[in-house]
Image (spheres, helix red, strand yellow):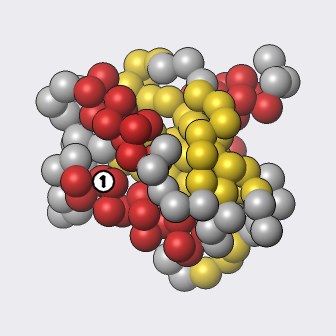
Amino acid sequence: MIDVAYIALGSNVGDRSAHLAHARAALATIPGSHVVGESSIEETEPLGGLVQDRYLNQMIALETTLAPRALLAHLLDIERAEGRTRSVRWAPRTLDLDIVCFDRQVVHEPDLHVPHRELSNRDFWQRELGELRGSE
C-alpha cells in the first residue's frame, strides 16, 4: 500500500541546517519512498525543561510503501548517521526524526504511536503539517 508519512525533523546541536539537509537527502533514499513535500524551516524553543539551544524544525511529506515500523527503523539509522545518541530524554540532539502521522495508517504499540502522541501539544508540528496538507 502506498501512503504518505509526515516526518518531523529537528536539530539543536552543531550545524543545525546541515543536519536537516542531510536528513532530507537521506529520506529521499529510503527504499520504496520519495519526498513529495517540505514545510518551511522554523526555529523553536526546546521542550522538556532542560537548558539548551533553540531547535530548527521542519516537516517532510514522504510517500512510501513501508509500514510505520519499517520506516521507523530507517529513521533511527539516519539519526545515528548524523551522530544522534540517546541518553537523557529531552536532551540536545544533532538530529531528531519523528513519524508525526500517516494519511491512512494508525499504530498503537508500546514503543510506536502513529499519530504521534505529542501532535496536539506541538503548535509548530501543526503549522508544518497544515502547510504540507495545504490548509494554511
The residue tagged 1 is 79
- Could you tell me which quadrant the N terminus lies in? bottom right
Image-quadrant location for residue 57: top left
The percent coordinates of residue 89 (x first, y second) are: 29, 58
Residue 22 vertical placement versus 63 (above, below):
above
The percent coordinates of residue 19 (x first, y second) are: 28, 34
The percent coordinates of residue 3 (x first, y second) are: 76, 57
Q: Is residue 48 visible?
A: no
Callout 1 secondary element: helix
Residue 19 vertical placement versus 39 (above, below):
below
Image-quadrant location for residue 52: top left
Residue 87 vertical placement versus 133 (above, below):
below
The amino acid type, in three-letter code, at marker 1 is: Glu
* Mark 1 crowdedness (10 Å alpha carbons): few <14, some 14-19, many ≥20: many
Task: Residue at 67%, 26% (x, y): give it.
Answer: 127
Nearer to me, 69 or 27: 27
Query: What is the count of numbered marks?
Result: 1
Task: Residue at 35%, 30% (x, y): give it.
Answer: 21
Q: Is residue 112 left or right of residue 19?
A: right
The percent coordinates of residue 75 (x first, y second) are: 42, 58
Q: Is residue 70 left or right of residue 136?
A: left
Image-quadrant location for residue 135: top right
Task: Residue at 69%, 73% (x, y): give it.
Answer: 107
Please identify the residue farthest to the bottom as the structure is shown.
110
- Could you tell me which quadrant the C terminus lies in? top right
Q: Is residue 8 visible?
A: yes
